[in-house]
Image (cartoon, rainbow, N blue to C red):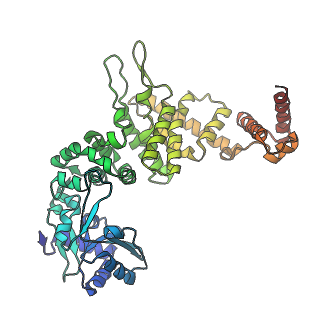
Amino acid sequence: MTSALGAAGELAIRSLIEKAPMASSLADAFKSAGYRLALVGGPVRDAILGRLGNDLDFTTNALPHETKKILQSWAESVWETGIVFGTVAGKRGDTTVEVTTYRTDSYGEESRKPAVEFGDSIEVDLSRRDFTINAMALELTQGAPVFIDPHNGLSDLAKKIIRTPSTPEDSFSDDPLRIMRAARFASQLDFAIADEVLLAMKNMSGRISIISAERVRDELTKIVMSPKPRTGITILVETGVAALILPEIPKLQLEIDEHHHHKDVYEHTLTVLEQAIAHENRLGGENLVIRLAALMHDVGKPKTRALIAGGGVSFHHHEVVGARLTKERLKALRFDGNTIDDVSTLVALHLRFHGYGDGEWTDSAVRRYVRDAGELLTHLHVLTRADCTTRNKRKADALARTYLSLEERIEVLMEQEELSKIRPDLDGEEVMRLLQLKPSRAVGDAMDFLLELRLENGPMGAEKAEAELLKWWAARKQN
């Protein structure tokens, strides 16, 4: 249905004029060259919702090389990374635009790359898009703006429901990543997924295996970073998608028999994720590392689960196993090295606090806690606090007080000893001079000894450190 500018279109236009006035000049540039241009997809949806940003998507009947010429005369910078798929991007001021030629995309049964064909009809272009709420357009080059909504996306937007323009089966065959995108939009927009779409997601979940790890990673990241990641993760688990892309999470749904009750690890994990998000302000805002760490912190439990005689369950060393599983999974999903290292480190350390008991840690133990956390200390504070999901208020309050006392001790030692900059009391040159050594493994061993000494005793000063080093060196030579 192509309609005259209705209330929704008027709202979209107002939002577009207020937040992206350059769109009209871009439309004029395409119109002058004899082509059509329409705002399309997510920006139309967001304009109607009153949340339009500075990244705008357009569609046109101009072929990619013609689009590139127009953008080069309009934008301050242009890039053509996606030109083989019909997309050329540009930036002018604070506004980034992507302009794509009318097209249809589809995947073969086993292909990881879509076959792209260009068309000459915006209606056909919209019919091949993922969801009805993203299949609306605002034509900007045919006189007064025209709101185009052939699949009743506006109605679905009002109903807060996710449906597909064609059958879900056809849509997910065209691009299986749309199965994950449905979960993502449910998380981002707090929308429900239509029953027939949910059924197709379950029946076709196996198709996600033909999608590249990078695209899966990017979609998973958007779900994890959404306002309600629980929603999207739950959908991925219930449709069977998670079993293929992140199998460690559904495996947390451990069986609980009548003799060995324990808390639902899967539900606990989702609660920890939500509680970590509630403390993200300590990290400066939304933080992928802490969200992934919260999601993965207990993934070692299924492999370490053991029943205790007389009732109960143990998960000895699940943090060690979990750190290894986390590193393997994030590598498989092509996350960057820093993210992989940071998340797996937090998983490995997430139980360390529970050795603190009622606050009887020595200063040495506190120093080691800080040293091992390194730059992730605040992340570890957030994860440890989030990991308390007991419904026993007295127990929860006691854990919170104990952890607060640890944080306070860390602050005191930080001020006294600059814990974040823990170094041996002697440097390498001083060690080589004192022990009459050249650069060698023995120097490294000596530095390790001095670091352990520093962690155990705090700052000792050069004179005492030299005496201890000489004593250690003499004993080493005797052995």
Residue 171 drawn above or below residue 437 = below
Asked whether, in this view, residue 36 is left or right of residue 350, the answer is left
Give the residue furthest to the top.
310
Q: Name the spot of residue 110 as percent of width and height, x first.
A: 28, 51
Residue 210 drawn above or below residue 449 = below
How many marks are shown on the rendered structure? Answer: 0
233 or 219, nearer to the observer: 219
Q: Name the spot of residue 356 as percent of width and height, x first.
A: 57, 30
Residue 31 drawn above or below residue 257 = below
Asked whether, in this view, residue 8 is left or right of residue 206, the answer is left
Q: Where, quadrant-wise, is the C terminus in this rendering?
A: top right
Quarter of the image for residue 52 reads bottom left
Q: Name the spot of residue 134 as percent of width and height, x first.
A: 23, 62
Asked whether, in this view, residue 226 is left or right of residue 375, the answer is left
Q: Name the spot of residue 77 as percent of width and height, x first.
A: 43, 77
182 or 5, nearer to the observer: 182
Q: Where, quadrant-wise, is the N terminus in this rendering?
A: bottom left
- Residue at left offset 33%, top offset 78%: 65
162 or 410, nearer to the observer: 162
40 or 214, nearer to the observer: 214
Quarter of the image for residue 452 reads top right
Any part of residue 160 in sight: no
Any part of residue 346 in sight: yes
- Residue at left offset 18%, top offset 51%: 169
Residue 51 drawn above or below residue 322 = below
- Residue at left offset 20%, top offset 78%: 145
Give the residue furthest to the bottom.
32
